[in-house]
Amino acid sequence: MHLFFGLGCIFGALGVALGAFAAHGLGNTLSAPDLATFETAARYQMYHALALLAAAWAVDRWGGAFATAAGWAFVVGIVVFSGSLYMLVLTGPRWLGAITPIGGVAFILGWALLAWTALTSR
């Protein structure tokens, strides 16, 4: 529980910092589509930082492998989805866009596992 809560806080802080960096530091250097991509990465990172807090709560409240797996799915989703978009915008290799959906699938899996935990726990 402590790990997911701590990671959620760290990813949340980084999401705020990267969002501010995009708005204030990259606004004049990136194309509008690249800036939108970067902002999407920061937004999804923030959503799933909060999801990590929910996963931490679920692990503490109900325990179990599914709650833990949900937390790890959110971590993987943040790193792969948001990370690939940040790297695509900042470094340019467009092939990184091909791995972004893997992170999206990890997000979906995390939410499904979290729902399963909530619906099957007492």
Image: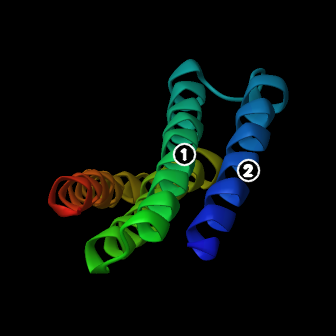
Q: Which circle marks residue 14 in the picture? A: 2
Q: Element under label 2?
A: helix
- Residue at image coords 30%, 60%: 106
| Residue 77 x, y percent position in the rendering | 41, 59
Residue 1, how many percent across, how many down?
Answer: 55, 72
Identify the mark nearer the N-term, 2 or 1: 2
Residue drawn at (47%, 52%) of the image:
54
Q: Identity of the amino acid at label 2? A: Leu
Which residue is the site of mark 1?
50
Badge 2 density bin: few <14, some 14–19, many ≥20, Cα 10 Å: some
Query: Could you tell me how far apart the alpha carbons at marks 2 and 1 are, in whole angstroms?
Result: 12 Å
Residue at 62% across, 55% down: 91
Quarter residue 63 falls in: bottom left
Residue 39 in picture, x, y percent from top left: 58, 31
Viewer can see residue 25:
yes
Which quarter shows the C terminus? bottom left
Amino acid type, callout 1: Leu
